[in-house]
């Protein structure tokens, strides 16, 4: 029986594997946005401050979905290397987290 899982029928993953194509509804997109917002809020709530190169930075453990972390990084809210177990919140990330705390925790 021939292999029907080809790149013409499925999306090819970035790691060379084959992944099913998914189509997000508007509701799914809103849920993804809420997950990203809540992840940023959780990062800020579980963060701590320490001095790095004579500068105070806010850091947190990177135990969240990598897709969401990549999105938050692209939006400029966090930064950190892929090899690190920590992320650092940017000033914009802290400001956005404060807005999200008002939105979700009040």
Image (cartoon, grey):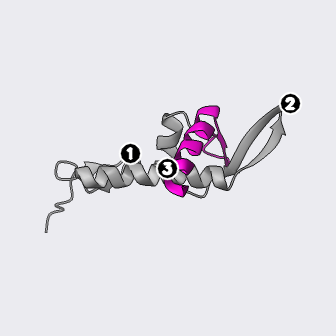
Q: CA distance from mark 3 to mark 2?
A: 33 Å
Q: Which residues are magenta?
A: 78-106
Q: Left or right of 42: which side holds 65?
A: left
> Is residue 24 among the parts visible in the rendering?
no
Picture coordinates of residue 44 (x, y %)?
A: 64, 49
Q: What residue appears at the point 33 percent right and 51 percent down from the top-left corner?
A: 30
Q: Nearer the viewer, residue 100 or 76?
A: 100
Dot 1, how many residues are within 10 Å of its Cα: few (below 14), some (14-19), or many (20+)? few
Q: Residue 18 in magenta?
A: no
- Residue under pointer 3: 103
Q: Quadrant of the C terminus?
A: bottom right
- Residue under pointer 2: 54
Q: What residue appears at the point 29 percent right and 55 percent down from the top-left corner?
A: 28
Q: Marks 3 and 2: CB-CB under 8 Å?
A: no
Picture coordinates of residue 94 (x, y %)?
A: 62, 40
Above or below residue 6? Residue 97 is: above
Q: Quadrant of the N terminus?
A: bottom left
The mark that comes first in sequence, 3 or 1, is 1
The mark that comes first in sequence, 2 or 1, is 1
Picture coordinates of residue 27 (x, y %)?
A: 26, 54
- Disc nearest the viewer among 3 and 2: 3
């Amino acid at each position: 029986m021939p292999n029907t899982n080809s790149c013409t029928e499925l999306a090819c993953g970035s790691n060379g594997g084959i992944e099913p194509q998914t189509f997000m509804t508007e509701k799914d997109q809103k849920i993804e946005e809420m997950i990203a917002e809540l992840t940023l809020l959780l990062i800020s709530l579980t963060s701590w401050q320490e001095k790095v190169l004579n500068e105070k930075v806010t850091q947190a453990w990177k135990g969240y979905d990598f897709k969401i972390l990549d999105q938050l990084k692209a939006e400029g809210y966090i930064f950190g290397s892929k090899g690190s177990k920590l992320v650092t919140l940017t000033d914009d990330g802290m400001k956005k987290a404060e807005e999200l705390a008002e939105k979700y925790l009040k």
